[in-house]
Amino acid sequence: MLNDQKGGVKLTRVTCTLALGDKTATSRSPINVNIFVAVDIFNGKKLEGIVPSSHNCDVPHVNRTDYQLIDISEDGFVSLLTENGNTKDELRLPTDDNLLTQIKNGFGDGKDLVVSVMSAMGEEQICDLKDIGPK
C-alpha cells in the first residue's frame, strides 16, 4: 500500500481525494505501476487511475474559505461577503440536495449563515454550512 492514504491526487485533470492506493507489478512487464482509486472532491464520482511508478503524480492545491451568505438570487447564484468587505457573486448554490435544503431553509428563516467554499484547479463549490445564529 502507498503511504499517503489521505492525500489528494489529480486524475485526468480532476481534483480527487485518494481513497485507495496500491503498488503492483504487471504480469506482462516488470514495470511497477501505482493504482489509484479516488473520489472527485466536487461531485463525488469515483475514478480509477494507473500511473507507472517511475512517473510523478500531480497533487492539487485545495483551499477552503469561509464566507458569510448575504443573498440567494432566483437564478441560483449566491452573494457572499468576503473578509475585506467585498461581495463574491459568481458561485451557484450546491448540487447536493441536503446542503441545498439546509442553505435555503436557514436563509429563509433569517439565520446568519457562513458557507465554506472549496476551490482547486480553477473550480469552486460550496461544500459546508455553519449557522452562526439569528440575524
Image: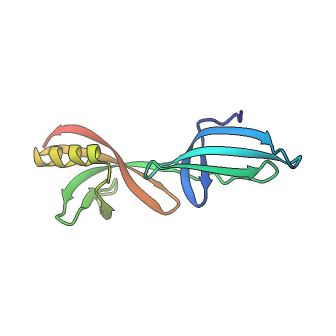
Q: Quadrant of residue 124?
A: bottom left
Q: What is the x, y in percent for residue 102?
A: 22, 43
Residue toward you, 114 or 20:
20
Lateral position of residue 64 relative to residue 76, left or right: right
Quadrant (top left/top right/bottom left/bottom right) for the N terminus: top right
User: Residue 89's image quarter?
Assistant: bottom left
Q: Is residue 36 above or below residue 83?
A: above
Q: Residue at x 81, y 45 (%)?
A: 26
- The x, y position of residue 10, in whole percent, is 61, 54
Can you tell which quarter of the image residue 72 is in? Answer: bottom left
Residue 111 location (% of width, % of height): 15, 43
Q: Is residue 124 rendered to the left or right of residue 16?
A: left
Which residue in the rendered view is the most extreme toward the left? 109
Residue shown at the point (83%, 44%) measured from the top left: 27
Residue reaching furthest right?
A: 30
Q: Would you say 132 lies left or right of 7 here?
A: left
Question: In the picture shown, does residue 23 fall above or below 59?
Answer: above
Q: Is residue 111 left or right of residue 64?
A: left
Visual colour scheme: rainbow
Image quadrant holding the C terminus, namely: top left
Nearer to me, 93 or 26: 26
Answer above or below: position of 12 versus 128.
Answer: below
Please tell me which residue is depicted at 19% across the width and 44% down the height of the picture.
Answer: 112
Instruction: Tell me residue 25's x, y (percent).
Output: 82, 42
Q: Nearer the viewer, residue 74 or 95?
A: 95
